[in-house]
Structures are given as structure tokens and as C-alpha cells.
Image: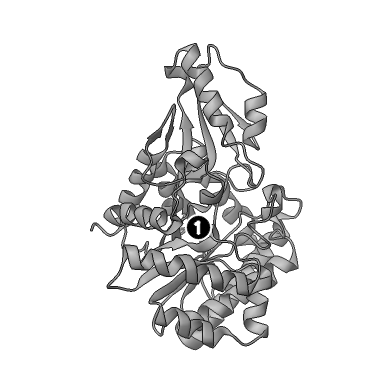
Amino acid sequence: MLGYCTNVHAGANLVEMRKNLSEYATEVRRLFSPDQPMGIGLWFSAKSAEQLVNEKQVDDFRSWLEEQRLVPFTFNGFPYGDFHQESVKHAVYLPTWEQPERVAYTLLLIDILDQLLSEGMDGSISTLPIAWESSAPKQAASNLVTVAGQLHRLREVSGRHIRLCIEPEPGCVLQYSSDLVKFYEQHIDAAVVSAGIGESFAVRDYLTVCHDSCHASVMFEPQVDAITNYRNAGIGIGKVQVSSAIEIPFSGMDPDSQKQAIEQLSVFAEDRYLHQTVCRNDETGKTEFHDDLPKALAATKAGDLRETWRVHFHVPLFLKEFGMLRSTQDETVECCKLLAADPLVTDFEVETYAWGVLPKSLKFENLAEGISREMAWAKKLVLNS
């Protein structure tokens, strides 16, 4: 199924979340899929998830989604707090998988998703790649295995198969596919043994990966390499986030063009989100990592730059070039074509959460129109229609 991630809309509390879904998600469906139900990836902050359950509004919310013909097949369980506060930056990685708050939040999302899904439907929940920095990977693995056990029990009782999908991201403990594979082999497998689970259930049926095409691109990891690594390790791809990064091919520009490109790129250095930046020397292949775009800009100047930069800034999928900059759209296309052909990969989520912080020249006056255009672009690749 294809949907778009509603973390693009504010929703730190339940009232605000419902208001934005009413205003935007319903309009996206009207524009993109007027005659058929449309998939959406829901994002609940911890506060809004707790309100939904404590105030016993799950049934009412499910009925409303059904009336609006919105199908909540997947959740984004990465941002825990207010994803639209004035400054998010590194706070988005808190709490980590080493902390009990992350476990409690994820279990709450599992309960909500189970209640919202129609009978016979399976689902997925994406989550953060352990932490920005980790001091207790064994504890993180133990917590993840605990959640996998709950997912297994749910499946035994109801037949519902919900997958928790770990999402590698630039700069985090797990940023390359090889990092995730190593974490499974060194920590997840050991946690299974420590828990005494044995052969009672296959953890990898429930702990899968969320492959974000933007994130792999920023790290200069070819999509096919990442996907192959997961498959060879027996780690399923439970969810795909369809997204594109900014790319700046400085090595192909003259000094004046490099200066113009830096000036244009500077507009993307905003205060809310972290925009990890990787600079690759196109002669040596070596890369340099900056945890935020302003730091990369401060460390360079136009001239004889022989680099290609990639920036973790989710730009609209249909954009390939804009001014002196371009996107990693070609890699996003490659990702979609590779995974759409895999019958085991079922959940695709357009995740351009940065619409609200885009430069004015790239914004749509009608946000729903921009998102529906992204959905139409992705549909051609994912659903071949």
C-alpha cells in the first residue's frame, strides 16, 4: 500500500492532530484518490497517543478514518515529542531505545494500530535507529526483543502481523545498512539468547528495517547495496520511506557557479530540523560528515571545490533540479523500482516532512496539492499506475 506520512502536519496533542488531518489529509485524498480509499502513515506524539487511549477515543477515531476513507496502514513511531516545535534538532532522537519511555511509547502505538487496522490487515511502525549516540547497545537490543515478543503474542491471539521497522539515519548509531546488520548479529541475536526465547518465535519476523531512500543517498550508499545487505542478512524490509535529499555537484561547477550554489543552499539552513551533510571528494571518494548544514557551510567557501554534497533535507519528490541544486531523485526512483518488484515489501510511505521549512520559492500555496502531486509521482513507480 502507498500512503503519505502525516508527520508533515503539526500534532503535539490530539486536538491539533485531528484538526490537521481534517484540513489536509482529507483534501489530499480528494485530489489524489477521489474515488478510492487512500493510505496514510499516522504520526502520534506520545502525548496525543496517550490522550487517544486514556480518553477512550480510539473507536471514534477509527470510525472517522473509515468515513473519510483514510487507511492507517503504518505509523511513524520515530518522533516522540513535538515534531513541529521551534527547534527539534537532536531532540528527535529522545528517548532512545535504551530508555523505558521508548518501549512504553512503542507498545502504546502497537495497541492503537491494532485497533485502527481493519480485520485481516497487517501493519508496520518505523522507529529510530537506537540513538544518536549509544552507551548501552545491549539494553537497546533487549528492549527491542521485548517489543518483538509482544508483537508475536499479538499475532498469536489475533493473527495480526505488525512489524517494527528500524530506520537507519545519517549520524546515528545505525547509519549504514552494514551498521544495522552488525547490530542484529552482535546484539539482537545475543538478546534473544539472554531472554531464553530460543526457537519459540523468529525475532526477525517482527524486527525489520525501514529503508529511507533519502537517508541512504545522503550517506552515498547505493540503494541496491543497502537492499542486498538486508536481504543477505535475512532482515526483512518492513517499510519503505520514499524520500529525496538535496545534492550539490560542486565539482562540475566553475567558481562563480559554486558561489551561487552556496548562496542558494544557505537558504535551507533553517533552525527546526537537523540537516546532516556529507561532502564527498569526487577525486578520492573520501567523505566528510557534518551533523548539520550550517556547520558544513561554515567550513567551506566557493572556489575550487571538487566535491559533491548531499544534505538530509527531504525535498518534494517530483523536484529533480531547482536553481543550482538538484535532488537525489534518480536514487529514489531506483529504490522504488527495486522494492516495488519484491512481493514481500508492501508498505510504501511518502515522507517529505520538511514542507513547512522549505524556501518560499519551493512551497505550494496549497499544501494538499503539493502532497497529492508527490503521491501521484510515487504511485507510478510503486504501483505501476
Horizontal relation, residue 106 to residue 280: left or right: right
Q: Nearer the viewer, residue 260 or 222?
A: 260
- Report whether residue 190 is seen: yes
Check the image and tell me how it is coloured: one colour
Q: Name above or below for residue 266 compared with residue 204.
A: above
Residue in view at x 74 percent, y 63 percent: 99
- Report whether residue 286 is seen: no
Q: Nearer the viewer, residue 104 or 237?
A: 104
User: Can you tell which quarter of the image residue 57 is in?
Assistant: bottom right
Residue in view at x 40 percent, y 77 percent: 68
Residue 77 x %, y % = 58, 64
Q: Which residue is mark 1?
A: 209
Name, please, the residue furthest toward the front.
365
Residue 94 x %, y % = 71, 57
User: Can you tell which quarter of the image residue 237 is in?
Assistant: bottom left
Residue in view at x 71 percent, y 53 percent: 91
Q: Name above or below for residue 216 compared with residue 188.
A: above
Q: Name above or below for residue 93 compared with residue 49.
A: above
Q: Nearer the viewer, residue 207 or 356?
A: 356
Q: Quadrant of the C terminus?
A: bottom left
> Does dot 1 land on a helix, a strand or a loop?
strand
